[in-house]
Image (tube, grey):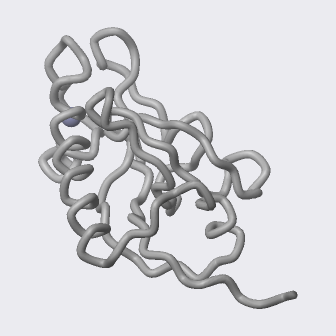
Amino acid sequence: MDEAPEPLWLVAANVVRWRRYGDLGQEFRPGTKAFRGGAKVYVTDTHPGTGNEQLTAVGHGRHTGRWITIDTGTRHLHTFRPQLVYSPAVIERCAAMPVRTRVEAAELAELLDRIARLGRHTHHAGPHPYPCLCHECLPLSPA
Ligand SMILES: [Zn+2]
């Protein structure tokens, strides 16, 4: 008892500061409904059957600060990277997940990064407004 669980290779990411909102994506909302912008999350499940446009993430919830596990749009996350995770709270939420190697986690991170970038450009039918606060445009907009 009280033994530390084996560390797991997971994909970590951060929640975008702003996401486009509304049918044409001309408005903005900070972070997601569940997570603050900038929050660090871990990907605990993917949904290849739907092109991985959604994934399951665990992180500290926006309202309570407690760990939550929730499905979110892949496009709402950025800077996917492999990370060896020691936190028992996270590991216990990954019980059903196949164990990954560092290489597998890195490959998944690259895939999710591509899907997130694509989603930020294609999810909304309208063009990005200008200035745009989305993760793809923020560096291009005036300060
Ligand atoms: Zn944009």
Identify the image quadrant of residue 65.
bottom right
Q: Pick out the residue farthest to the right.
A: 1
Q: Is residue 134 left or right of residue 118?
A: right
Q: Which of the image's four quarters has the N terminus?
A: bottom right
- Which image quadrant is residue 107 in? bottom left
Residue visible at 50% across and 44% down in the picture: 56
- Point out residue 132 in the picture as x, y percentages from the top left corner: 23, 34
Q: Foreground residue, 24 or 118?
A: 118
**Number of numbered discs visible in the structure rendering:** 0
> Which of 104 and 74 lies nearest the eye of the viewer?
104
Q: Is residue 57 left or right of residue 120?
A: right
Name the residue at 74% across, 45% down. 63
Q: Judge left or right: residue 123 versus residue 94.
A: left
Q: Position of residue 13 (x, y in %)?
A: 39, 60
The residue lying at 51 percent from left, 59 percent from top is 41
Q: Is residue 143 visible?
A: no
Q: Position of residue 71 (x, y in %)?
A: 53, 37
Q: Is residue 42 above or below residue 128?
A: below
Identify which residue, 123 or 103, lies in the foreground: 103
Image quarter for residue 101? bottom left
Horizontal placement of 51 versus 137: left or right?
A: right
Asked if residue 90 can be seen in this view, the reply is: yes
Residue at 45% x, 81% y is 84
Give the answer, above or below, for where 36 lies relative to 81.
above
- As displayed, is residue 114 above or below residue 6? above
Query: x, y (%) of residue 139?
Result: 17, 53
Quadrant of picture, ligand 1: top left
